[in-house]
Image: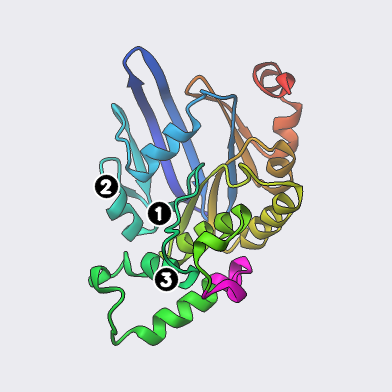
Amino acid sequence: MHDILKIKNLNKKFGGVIATKNLNLSILDGELHAIIGPNGAGKTTLVSQIFGQIFPDSGQVFFQDINVTHVSEYKKSRLGINRTFQITSVMKSLTVSENIQLATNTIQENWFNFFKASNNQDYILKKIDFCLSQVGLVKAMNQPVANLSHGDCRKLEIAMALASDAQLLLLDEPMAGLGPTETKEMIALLNKLKGQQTILLIEHDMDAVFALADRISVLVSGEIIATGEPDKIRRDSVVQSAYLGEM
């Protein structure tokens, strides 16, 4: 496997607060790579820099060997990077299928006409059906998003990322706010997507992380202190002292 994402010497400060410090990270094509660390470690800030919502002070981000360090989030979405958020960001005034159609059309030139008939309508309908089948929401296709449970809204976010033809999914705490049953469903969904998509996962649920991840990187105070397979990370004395020992 080759690296789909490479981060080199990334630095970001907010005033006197160091959010990212000389950070280096490589994500392999097709892997599920988890980023863990205590609150305030800089995990969401890292994802925001990868996605283009925040630009680093220095350092570089490469996607498919293309320097995308200062590429906007809209252009990165078109290149094949998409993300979900800690707080769900679906359009509750639309139906489930309309949310997927919106995500599909953001990568097309005529996205602003997405409610109008077009010569690719058959393609869009197939895309909607495929993405919703991936996350188990086909039966909810015509429901208003406002009627969905929190867990189903989380699934819809992932379906929308898939609809944008993302090659790299950046998932920021997809288990946040989920109950035990919904958490099990999300773990099963991510396990299903493993290998089909490259996933960078930020998550505080350690049981989920160690069950899902191919590799784990530990972020503390803006620095990666360890990267490796789950068993290696679990046994790492530095990681235990800095993070896992607190749990």
- Left or right: where 152 falls relative to 89: right
Q: Residue at x 37, y 29 (%)?
A: 10
Residue 124 locus on image (x, y percent): 40, 79
Is residue 30 something one can see in this rendering? Answer: no
Q: Residue at x 64, y 56 (%)?
A: 190
Which range is magenta?
Answer: 132-142
Is residue 226 something one can see in this rendering? Answer: yes
Residue type for callout 1: Ile
Q: Secondary structure at mark 2?
A: loop
Q: Give the residue at mark 1.
A: 81
Are there few (<14), some (14-19), or many (20+) residues within 10 Å of tag 3? many
Q: Earlier in the sequence, mark 1 or mark 2?
A: 2
Quadrant occupied by the C terminus: top right
Q: Earlier in the sequence, mark 2 or mark 3?
A: 2
Q: Give the residue at mark 3.
A: 98
In the rendered image, which quarter is residue 69 located in?
top left
Q: Give the residue at mark 2.
A: 72
**C-alpha span from label 2 to label 3:** 25 Å
Are there few (<14), some (14-19), or many (20+) residues within 10 Å of tag 1? many
Q: Secondary structure at mark 1?
A: strand
